[in-house]
Image: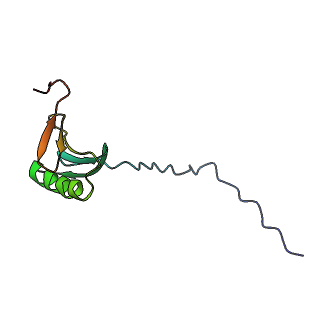
Amino acid sequence: MALRAAPKTRSKDMEPEVLVVDQRKKADERFRLQVDRQTKRSFTTLKSAVEAGLVIKQAHPIVQVSVYDSVDCTNQLVEVDGVVPAEPDAEPA
C-alpha cells in the first residue's frame, strides 16, 4: 500500500505572485500597416509602410490595405496604382 503525501499547506506570510499577461503589442512607430483593418506591422516612415503595403496588395488584390498615421489620425488606402487618402467627408468629383 502506497503512502499518502501530506497535504500542501501555504504559509500566511507568502502572497501569491500575480502575473499580468497582455497579448497586445504596442506599436512604437508612427505608421501602421493594416490589412482588412487589422494592424500587421508599424513603420517609422510612410514610404516604407506604403512599399510593404504594395507588396501585399499586388499579391492579394482583394484585401483592403491601408496605412494609418497615429500622429495625424488619418488613413490612406493602398491601391495597386498608388496611395489614395481615405477621407470620409470628401465627395467624389
Q: In which quadrant will I find the C terminus?
A: top left
Task: Spot the residue most to the front.
Answer: 93
Q: Nearer the viewer, residue 78 or 1?
A: 78
Expressed as whole percent of the image width and height from the top left, the position of residue 65 reads 24, 47
Expressed as whole percent of the image width and height from the top left, the position of residue 76 reads 17, 40
**71 lies above or below 16:** above
Using residue 90 as the reference point, say whether residue 33 is left or right of it: right
Using residue 35 as the reference point, say whether residue 82 is left or right of it: left
Using residue 92 as the reference point, say whether residue 21 is left or right of it: right
Expressed as whole percent of the image width and height from the top left, the position of residue 75 reads 19, 37
Q: Quadrant of residue 3?
A: bottom right
Residue at figure coordinates x 82%, y 68% from the top left: 4
Expressed as whole percent of the image width and height from the top left, the position of residue 67 reads 19, 44
Residue at figure coordinates x 25%, y 52% from the top left: 61
Residue at figure coordinates x 17%, y 47% from the top left: 79
Q: In which quadrant will I find the N terminus?
A: bottom right
Q: Nearer the viewer, residue 32 or 83?
A: 83
Residue at figure coordinates x 41%, y 50% from the top left: 23
Q: Nearer the viewer, residue 71 or 10?
A: 71
Using residue 89 as the reference point, say whether residue 34 is left or right of it: right
Task: Spot the residue most to the bottom.
Answer: 1
Figure disc tally: 0
**20 lies above or below 91:** below
**87 lies above or below 17:** above
The colouring scheme, among rainbow, by chain, secondary structure or one colour, is rainbow
